[in-house]
Amino acid sequence: AQQGIAVIAVDNTNGTWEYQTSGSWTTLAGSSTSAAIPLGTAHKIRFRPNANWAGTVASGITFKAWDRSAGASPGVALNVGTNGGGTPYSTADETASITVNPVNDAPVLNNSSAPSLPAINEDDANPSGMTITNLIAATAGITDVDAGAQQGIAVIAVDNTNGTWEYQTSGSW
């Protein structure tokens, strides 16, 4: 006999379960023993997590085995309330989990302000400079959805027309 599953429950709390029988993906929602979604071995399922969510969906997708002997069409809801014995559906259910790993999300620089460094005197050979913390504070800010993210900047251009820009990580300039 051919093999397949009949999806009877999904946990869409932190994302969306979908299946594909051909072409586009279809949302798996509202599955139950009276409205199970049958899928064959060539079909696909996937979980699309909500933006910036990471963790484990312990009861991700619950299903029964389906031997495909019934005339059900993949993706078309059917009742699997009567199962075991001579039916095409297993008595037992199985639940699969999925883990969504966190990734490093890029920080967001709010560049709606026009920050400036403190004024210095003409011919000052050793200006005090400004900390990056204070430069960030002078902007409208940096946000990052990653827990514990540190802040900093990457200098991508300077204008040396009227002097020389320098930076200090520790010690001398």
Image: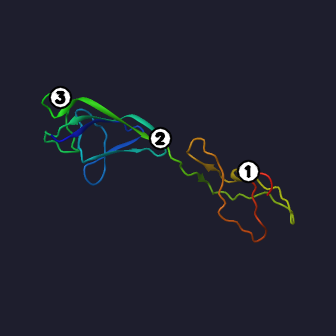
Identify the secondary structure beneath mark 3: loop
The amino acid type, in three-letter code, at marker 1 is Asn
Query: Where residue 48 sits in the image (x, y, percent)?
Result: 39, 45
Residue sitting at 77 percent across and 66 percent down? 164
Measure the alpha-carbon separation of dots 1 and 3.
69 Å
Residue marked by disc 1? 134
Q: In which quarter of the image is residue 14?
A: top left
Compared with 45, 81 (above or below) is above
Residue closer to the observer: 134 or 167: 167
Q: Going from the N terminus, do you reach mark 1 or mark 3 first?
A: 3
Residue sitting at 76 percent across and 55 percent down? 168
Classify mark 3: residues with Cα within 10 Å, few (<14), some (14-19) or many (20+).
few
Identify the secondary structure beneath mark 2: loop
Residue marked by disc 3? 84
The amino acid type, in three-letter code, at marker 2 is Ala
Image quarter in which the C terminus is found: bottom right
The amino acid type, in three-letter code, at marker 3 is Gly
Classify mark 2: residues with Cα within 10 Å, few (<14), some (14-19) or many (20+).
some
Residue sitting at 60 percent across and 41 percent down? 148
Query: Where residue 67 sits in the image (x, y, percent)?
Result: 17, 38
Residue sitting at 27 percent across and 55 percent down? 23
Image quarter in which the N terminus is found: top left
User: What label sits on residue 64 in the rendered view?
Assistant: none
User: What label sits on residue 54 in the rendered view?
Assistant: 2
Q: Going from the N terminus, do you reach mark 1 or mark 2 first?
A: 2
Query: Where residue 161 sits in the image (x, y, percent)?
Result: 75, 71
Q: Is residue 127 left or right of residue 106?
A: right
Please say which color scheme the image uses: rainbow
Q: Is residue 116 left or right of residue 6?
A: right
Q: In this view, does 109 lie to the left or right of 69?
A: right
Classify mark 1: residues with Cα within 10 Å, few (<14), some (14-19) or many (20+).
few
